[in-house]
Image (cartoon, helix red, strand yellow):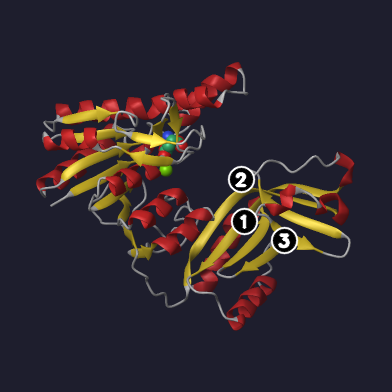
């Protein structure tokens, strides 16, 4: 028996039912003889009083320009409230526990405020508490710089905190508890019949997560791979084991890992000279099309700053509200497969605006309001 890290997301700590389910998972894991570390996110989603977005709103209402250190200080409070509450709840249910902020837990980060990276975890305090037989409940999403300033790990960063804690303390496994039963081939909110995957490799889930599958944070996957620690994504509300993420390469009979969706893309078309010198083009995530006179670019507004210092009237065309569907392949598909898929896209009369192939991904760009229907058609085509 070893150490198991159990991470619970915002919806998994928000209601009495969820907290009871959490309690059962902790109890079961302890009863099996393990030491248990619980990592929690802030309670609820935007609008809930202590959710991260709600806290950010408090500051933005005063002034939307926020000093990054202060934003981190306030954002970190959400997880601190959550870990205190869950620890008190466990104590009350006869499971002695210790609540630790990220910094009390020894999580040291760099000083890239609002999106810091963990550079070390001093696990002494966690270990001392485990040795006393306590469950250690840690506030996710946060750490401290070497000079003592509070940091956060980027939105969705509680997953990364949980995996890193597991890695540094040499846990047997990290369980990420969430409100869906695991990782599906397509977001089950879009295709309700999409099957869940029982196991997936670090590399394959990274591709899905990076291109928009919300179920686990891509940086958490990278961290898991670095430490080679198995991670399970599973439901808070059942005992099913969900999806196991590990270094094991899983074969696919259709060569398709899954479909991922991303919103909030923008498109610009400009005369070639306007952009040719710009740093904007160096971003590897930009999808580019060059013709004789024009450059067309699709980019994710959340990932990079709005390009450019281009004069308003030099845009030939400009659109937002574009979505991206990525078909993620396990191995680079053969030309034949690519051609069939392209034919299907043409003949199925879908709202596709553009497609881009990279080695193991087909990116389909289209107006956001067609994304759901197009994913459903693609899914039906394959199954
Ligand atoms: N509460 C943080 C966020 O909303 C971290 C997390 O939930 O993982 O981004
Ligand atoms: Mg999350």
Q: For numbered disc 3, what is the local secondary structure?
A: loop
Label for residue 243? none
Residue 69, percent across and down?
Answer: 51, 25
Mark toward the viewer: 1 or 2: 2
Give the spatial CA distance, label 3 vs label 2.
21 Å
* First in residue order: circle 3 vs circle 2: 2
Label 2: how many Cα within 10 Å (few below 14, some 14–19, many 20+): few
Q: Badge 1 local density, few (<14 within 10 Å), some, or many (20+)?
A: many
The residue depicted at 25 percent of the width and 55 percent of the height is: 240
Q: Is the CB–ligand 2 distance for label 1 below 8 Å?
A: no
* Displayed-image quarter of ligand 2: top left
Give the labeled residue for mark 3: 353
Task: List x then y, in percent, for residue 117.
Answer: 45, 41
- If you read the primary sequence from the N terminus, does the residue marked by circle 3 or circle 1 appear first? 1
Q: Is residue 140 visible?
A: no
Q: Which residue is mark 1?
A: 324
Q: Are marks 3 and 2 in contact (CB under 8 Å)?
A: no
In the rendered structure, the answer to whether residue 173 lies left or right of residue 285 reads left
What secondary structure is marked by label 2?
loop
Answer with left or right where residue 114 lies relative to residue 127: right
Dots 1 and 2: beta carbons under 8 Å?
no
Residue 369 visible (yes or no): yes
Question: Marks 3 and 2: which is nearer the front?
Answer: 2
Q: CA distance from mark 1 to mark 2?
A: 14 Å
Q: Residues within 10 Å of mark 3 (few under 14, many from 20)?
A: few
Picture residue at 45% right of the left edge, 49% below the top: 219
Q: Residue at the far top: name it.
A: 62
Q: Is residue 245 left or right of residue 348?
A: left
- What separation in Å lies between label 3 and label 1 (alpha carbons)? 10 Å
Q: What percent of the width, then of the height, locates residue 171?
A: 24, 49
Q: Is residue 115 left or right of residue 269?
A: left
In front here: 325 or 161?
161
């Amino acid at each position: 028996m070893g150490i198991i890290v159990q991470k619970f997301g915002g919806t998994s700590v928000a209601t009495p039912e969820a907290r009871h389910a959490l309690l059962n998972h902790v109890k079961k894991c302890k009863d099996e003889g393990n030491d248990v570390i619980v990592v929690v996110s802030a309670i609820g989603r935007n609008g809930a009083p202590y959710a991260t977005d709600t806290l950010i709103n408090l500051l933005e209402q005063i002034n939307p320009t926020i000093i990054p250190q202060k934003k981190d200080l306030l954002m970190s409070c959400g997880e601190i409230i959550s870990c205190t509450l869950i620890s008190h709840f466990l104590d009350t249910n006869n499971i002695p526990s210790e609540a630790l902020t990220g910094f009390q837990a020894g999580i040291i980060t760099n000083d890239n405020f609002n999106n810091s990276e963990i550079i070390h975890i001093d696990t002494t305090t966690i270990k001392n508490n485990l040795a006393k037989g306590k469950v250690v409940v840690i506030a996710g999403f946060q750490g401290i710089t070497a000079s003592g300033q509070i940091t956060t790990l980027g939105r969705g960063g509680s997953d990364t905190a949980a995996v890193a804690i597991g890695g540094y303390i040499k846990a047997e496994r990290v369980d990420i508890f969430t409100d869906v039963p695991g990782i599906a081939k397509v977001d089950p909110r879009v295709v309700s019949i999409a099957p869940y995957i029982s196991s997936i490799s670090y590399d394959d889930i990274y591709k899905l997560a990076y291109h928009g599958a919300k179920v686990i944070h891509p940086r958490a996957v990278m961290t898991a791979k670095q430490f080679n620690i198995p991670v399970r994504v599973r439901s808070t509300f059942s005992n099913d084991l969900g999806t196991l993420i590990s270094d094991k390469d899983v074969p696919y009979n259709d060569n398709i890992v899954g479909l991922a969706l991303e919103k909030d893309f923008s498109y610009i078309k400009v005369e070639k000279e306007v952009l040719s010198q710009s740093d904007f083009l160096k971003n590897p995530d930009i999808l580019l099309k060059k013709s004789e006179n024009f450059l067309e670019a699709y980019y994710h507004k959340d990932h990079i700053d709005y390009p450019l210092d281009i004069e308003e009237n030099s845009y030939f065309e400009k659109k937002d509200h574009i979505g991206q569907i990525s078909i993620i392949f396990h191995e680079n598909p053969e030309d034949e497969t690519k051609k069939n898929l392209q034919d299907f896209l043409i003949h199925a009369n879908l709202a596709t605006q553009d497609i881009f192939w990279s080695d193991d991904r087909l990116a389909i760009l289209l107006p956001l309001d067609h994304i759901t229907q197009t994913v459903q058609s693609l899914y039906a085509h394959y199954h």
